[in-house]
Image: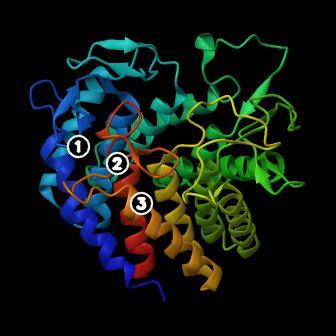
Amino acid sequence: MLNHYAETYKNELLNEVVPFWEKNSLDKEYGGYFTCIDNSGEIYDTDKFIWLQARQIWMFATLCQKVQKNEAWKKIAMHGARFLEKQGRDEFGNWYFSLNQKGEPLVQPYNIFSDCFAAMAFGKLYEIEPKERYAEIAKTTFENILKRRENPKGKYNKIYRGTRNLQNFALPMILCNLSLELEHLLGSEQVDSVTDSVVNLIMNKFYHKESGLVLENISVGGEFVDSFEGRLLNPGHAIEAMWFIMNLGIRKKDIDLVKKAEKIMFQQLEYGWDNEYGGIFYFMDIKNHPPQQLEHDQKLWWVHVETLVALAKTYTCTQNDKAKKWFEKVHDYTWNHFRDKENGGEWYGYLNRKGEVHLNLKGGKWKGCFHVPRGLLEVWQTLER
């Protein structure tokens, strides 16, 4: 049984990780959150990245909803929401990528994931503070995301259209989870419509049946494209997507979908595991050619945390010994390498291939208050059930 791990994950979440962000991340002068925080809790850069601001709103609102009605957590969520509501969007309702500390725009709204996590944040905020404007922000943003699906970067897309048109895995993956997060606002009919199409795309197009692996990019028609982008694998992305799809399968009472997601998850994990040093590779090439990403052999926090969530969900559904053994293996690697045993608090994010800390930051441009606390919460509550 794995349920004895539940208390370990709960304690780490509530006594180490959440207090780190409560203590260090709030900008009490201008609003919003700092995310560029080193291992001692010092702020080393004050720029604010919209998707990380939104993720922290969602995280603290989720803690209020799923753990306890804690007024301090609610205040932290509202603190970020006030900043984003006032500063986060352009005149067309598109969410910027980043702002300076005061909330002045730095980078244009080219990145649709700012919108995705803003919708998720205000949707969750509405559940703990049911003000109609929060629901409207979430729904309007979600509709804008759907309108941009075919060309997410819009006028900021640097790709020359028509020569090698590709579709990327990330947005369909996010829509699996985002739709479920917003079901209380969208209704089950719209959730079914969106998720049925993206699940079909993921499981029948991005999933490369011949290899058993999930591609990061395919042609607009769903075919394999033999290029750097077309050969690219991101095992962590695929594994995370599979636990989203398991949730959808459970919601639909579709056991075949759950089993297929479990099978694909294991295929990615087994292929992506570094048998020499342990851990899961960041990027790989499906033909074993050299990847173009120089960081391809690094070990990243979110990849491993999301894998633990997927394995916990798999074990809860199936009780199979394979899930148990893999959970224990990934748990040991993750807790021994990413967790800061000296300072406590939030975990490290970036290791080299050997598992040594590569950057001693606890948060930055891409890492904020999200994957570690969400993962700890998901594993705790999944195994406790």
Q: Nearer the viewer, residue 298 or 102?
A: 298
Name which of mark 3 and mark 2 comes first in the sequence: 2
Identify the amino acid type marked 3. Answer: Gly
Name which of mark 1 and mark 3 comes first in the sequence: 1
Residue on which the image places disc 3? 375
Name which of mark 2 and mark 1 comes first in the sequence: 1
Q: Residue at x 82, y 28 (%)?
A: 227
Pinpoint residue 381: horizontal percent, then vertical percent: 39, 73
Secondary structure, mark 3, is helix
Q: Residue at x 17, y 43 (%)?
A: 40
Identify the amino acid type marked 2. Answer: Tyr
Q: Is residue 14 above or below residue 298?
A: below
* 9 to the left or right of 41: right
Q: Which mark is residue 348?
A: 2
- Which residue reaches farthest left? 29
Secondary structure, mark 2, is loop
**Given contact means CB atoms under 8 Å apart, are the residues at marks 2 and 1 in contact?**
yes
The quarter of the displayed image where residue 54 is located: top left
The quarter of the displayed image where residue 365 is located: top left
Identify the amino acid type marked 1. Answer: Asn
Q: Nearer the viewer, residue 62 or 17?
A: 17
* 208 to the left or right of 140: right
Q: Residue at x 71, y 72 (%)?
A: 254
Pinpoint residue 186: horizontal percent, then vertical percent: 53, 48
Q: Nearer the viewer, residue 303 or 108?
A: 303
Q: Is residue 54 above or below residue 346?
A: above
